[in-house]
Image (cartoon, rainbow, N blue to C red):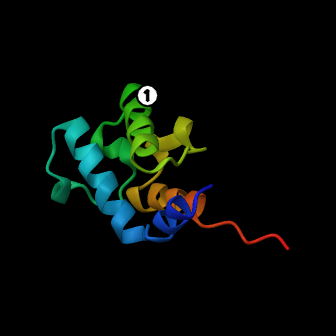
Amino acid sequence: MSAVRSTAREAFSREAVTERLKQLLGELLEMEPSDLDDEVPLSAFGIDSMTSAVLVSGVEKWCGAQLESAGALGSLTLTEVADEVVALLRPLPERN
């Protein structure tokens, strides 16, 4: 991985990722991002398997994270998805 990519990964905070997820999901569901509660399961907003797949694809295009929870997104909150993205983007420790 290049140094630029590693540095960019370090810049992803839970808050920044949550806001980007709100934007992506808001576009998909034709809702205002401000209407999406971070702590409500995505299923409450009407997310289905098709919407989940598009959201997962959008996240991957945006930051390169490949969500492992893709099949269970409806049961997760935006905060939980953001935590997964941040964990996936956390820099790996240097090997000696």
Is 29 rendered above or below residue 26? above
Instruction: Give SS at disc 1.
Output: helix
Q: Which residue is mark 1?
A: 49
Residue 42: x %, y % from top left:
37, 46
Quadrant containing the C terminus in the rendered view? bottom right
The amino acid pointed to by label 1 is Ser
Q: Nearer the viewer, residue 95 or 55?
A: 95
At x 61%, y 44%, the residue is 68
Q: Nearer the viewer, residue 24 or 60?
A: 60
At x 38%, y 32%, the residue is 54
Residue 86: x %, y % from top left:
51, 63
At x 35%, y 56%, the residue is 40
Residue 52: x %, y % from top left:
42, 35
Residue 3 visible in the snapshot: yes
When asked about the image quadrant of residue 55, the answer is top left
Q: For label 1, count other residues whose C-alpha is less than 10 Å away and answer few (under 14), some (14-19) or many (20+).
A: few
